[in-house]
Amino acid sequence: MTVLKTSMRNFFAHKGRMALSAVAVILSVAFVCGTLVFSDTMNTTFDKLFAATSADVTVTSKSATDPGDRPDTGKPESMPASVVERAKKAPGAGSAEGAVSSESVTVVDAEKKNVGPSNGGPTIAGNWTRNELRSMDITSGHAPRGPTDVMVDADTADKHDLKIGDELRTIAVTGDHTAKISGIATFKVTNPGAAIVYFDTPTAQRELLGATGRFTHVNVTAEKGVSDADLKRDVAGAMGADASAYQVKTQQETSDDNRDSVSGFLDVMKYAMLGFAGIAFLVGIFLIINTFSMLVAQRTREIGLMRAIGSSRKQVNRSVLVEALLLGVIGSVLGVGAGVGLAIGLMQLMSGMGMELSTQDLTVKWTTPVVGMVLGIVVTVLAAYLPARRAAKVSPMAALRDAGTPADGKASALRAFIGLVLTGAGAFGLYTASQADKASDGSLLLGGGVVLTLIGFVVIGPVLASGVVRVISAVLLRWFGPVGRMAERNALRNPRRTGATGAALMIGLALVACLSVVGSSMVASATDELDKSVGADFIIQSDNGQAITPKAAKSLEKADHIAHITQYKDIKADLTAPNGKTAKEVGLSAADATYAEDLRTETVAGTLADAYKPDSMSVGEDFAKDHGLSVGDKVKLAFDHGRTGELTVRAITSSETAIDSGAMYVNITTAAKYVPADRMPPNVIMFAKAAEGQQDAAYKSLKTAMADYPQYKVMDQTDFKQTLKDQVGQMLNMVYGLLGLAIIVAILGVVNTLALSVVERTREIGLMRAIGLSRRQLRRMIRMESVVIALFGALLGLGLGMGWGATAQKLLALEGLKVLEIPWPTIITVFIGSAFVGLFAALVPAFRAGRMNVLNAIATE
């Protein structure tokens, strides 16, 4: 009880000094809890949506693709209308109706603007059925009654200012269909961001499937008292002799399948955010260790008195740990609450980006606060353990003689040895990774090297502080005369403290530097490969990977000032080599012969142009080695949904390429011999070559030809390079934003270190003021000390991160990304920015130091 009372008294006596450490705990716990609440809310939103839209039992074709995947033909797999009649006759079936649904569509308004989601969500077109009433109400107008009617969901109507009577054009591989909005339907549950349009059944069949009398699935409703499982059994039995051609699923099974289709995206987002929360926790550990180390040092005399009057080492140890426990509990409780607020903020942010999430679905599971509390408390107590042990080792006599802990003033030789060993082992791991023959083998070595070098730099940080701070000071602080020299000595007086404070900033900046190097190298490598390999002047493709419809492709072919247009399709086939070895579902790149000009692919045997001859093909170098193939060999290809043919290998392409690496090329005319016309997939991308000297005119002509199809982009090589750069930049900006939390915690660490350092040096500051140091000089000294510490952390972090990034690029070079580019403008900007971070962090401590009463400061013991 005495230990508890002492701990609580000390905690609340120094509550101001604990505040910034508490903020670090709050932020870290909030990020974890906010991530969990946000991901659970997304799961709840999708679960409610899938449960509401799924029928009691659903019948689909066995050959149908998984939810969310687009069929190769651009049309969903369908089944005859007779299946509906069979399902109706099943015992226990109250009703059954055929449904049509396709995600391979684009919907544009009268101004030719895409009304689909911009966040990657699907655009879904289908027929209006009774099953839709489970999840939607018609709130304006009426359901589609004929080919001139279309109904749209209310969310899409609101986003794009659509109203009844407005014209919408639906673009699919089967053609374009124009209709006027006859009604608007509102979701009863939250729509995360899909755009949905409905037609009457005959129109949906004709425009989406290309044939009447067919459906993509059948919705079966159970009679009262009949379970879904019983209905599933009865419907499966009603399918008759060809039951094996169909899948019959209950509402729960359909919901689970739909849930699985989005779980990958949700899990990646969840674990990525938790990873950054872990980094924030790691940085927070340094802040907490520093805080308690300095508090213990400042209370050395007090601890000595406690030991002198009978307190044991265990009691002193427990006293410090109880303070940490109080800090952990208070910070974690506030962090859990802040986490819920953060989750709501993330939901609002996602809504602004087009992914709707409602606070009505806000989900806070009991495990979330438990995880946050446990993490916050355990991490805080563990971080305070070393300072607590150090406090317990203070002897009564030593404490009464000395106001501090001299042992903190220098890094031990053992620490230096351990740090060097860990750093050396990590550096060896990075070097070994850079020499790996396979990226998969080197990635493990890279991960090990990153972890070991990071830990090594943390351990050896106090040793490095003495040398690095002197170098920085010689360049920066000597210009400020005596004030600069005093700032340097203050930073050097406790290398362990300086090392720990700098390490917190080092972690975040190391990751920033690493990702900057990797991102810049990826862009530079892709740009270099484009310059060397791509001969086409223009590239035409969609933003979201949607295939180019036949009608859009024909529009392209009408463009003027064009030397040639190249079609490019993805086809699958089972390939059997002469040795009898079969490779299942091999991807073939079916293209016009002009593709050999559009992409200058190197060959190790044969000539690529020969691969486009009748019944000919090329294979990749690695595939040829694995299957014992050489030029002139004949292989059997069983084309997906087509016939089997025998093709001759005319070329073997080099594996030393980043674009189309390992691709197998075949002429479209050859593929058309074996794949039926209705099974031939649309183009996934197209290329164009301008007539000699007509690049500008051809560019305008292609843009005009595609004006009716806003989902496709016409890009010249400059546009394509900029698109790659923008995509990498968006990814890096998102990562930098998440890393910003760790950097904020690191800044708090600098603030806390300086604030406690000012308290620790109260008497010293008073004496300096008494002998003539002005307030302005005092504040400048503290700011310079802060800048040096920040630059020390930045220098270590940026150097470490560039080493990681350079090693990662060596592995990427094995995948064809061979250019290493150091983004010096970014690195220099971050380094200079770190100096401003140091200035910002010192504002409050410097202001407080300048406000000290000189006589009171001198009288402080």
Image (cartoon, rainbow, N blue to C red):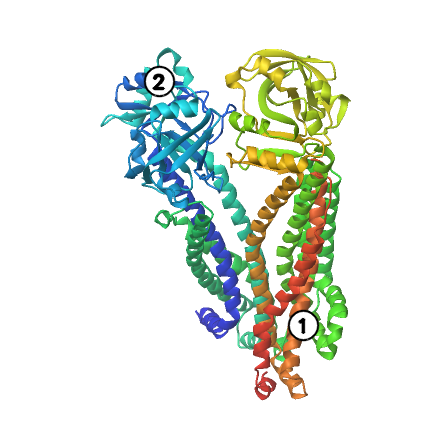
Residue 139 location in percent, x, y? 29, 40
Label of residue 513 in the image: none
Residue lying at the far left in this picture: please name it.
224
Q: Quadrant of the C terminus?
A: bottom right
The foreground one among 263 and 328 is 263
Residue 319 location in percent, x, y? 51, 68
The foreground one among 414 and 707 is 707
**Up/down of 213 relative to 812, above or below:** above
Label of residue 81 in the image: 2
Q: Residue at x 64, y 62 (%)?
A: 833
**Up/down of 838 relative to 814, above or below:** below
Q: Is residue 522 visible?
A: yes
Quick check: 116 left or right of 824? left
Q: Quadrant of residue 657?
A: top right
Q: Residue at x 67, y 59 (%)?
A: 829
Quick check: 353 left or right of 827? left
Q: Quadrant of the N terminus?
A: bottom left
**Residue neighbourhood size for the residue with mark 2, other residues' Cα within 10 Å, grouped as few (<14), some (14–19), many (≥20):** some
Q: Is residue 391 visible?
A: no
**Up/down of 121 relative to 21, above or below:** above
Which type of secondary structure does the marked residue at label 1 adopt?
A: helix
Q: Residue at x 43, y 52 (%)?
A: 348
Q: Which residue is mark 1?
A: 784
Residue 453 location in percent, x, y? 69, 51
Between disc 2 and disc 1, whose residue precedes? 2
**Type of residue at label 2?**
Ala
Q: Residue at x 70, y 59 (%)?
A: 795
**Up/down of 573 relative to 199, above or below:** above
**Type of residue at label 1?**
Met
**Residue neighbourhood size for the residue with mark 1, other residues' Cα within 10 Å, grouped as few (<14), some (14–19), many (≥20):** many
Q: Are marks 2 and 1 in contact (CB under 8 Å)?
A: no
Which type of secondary structure does the marked residue at label 2 adopt?
A: loop
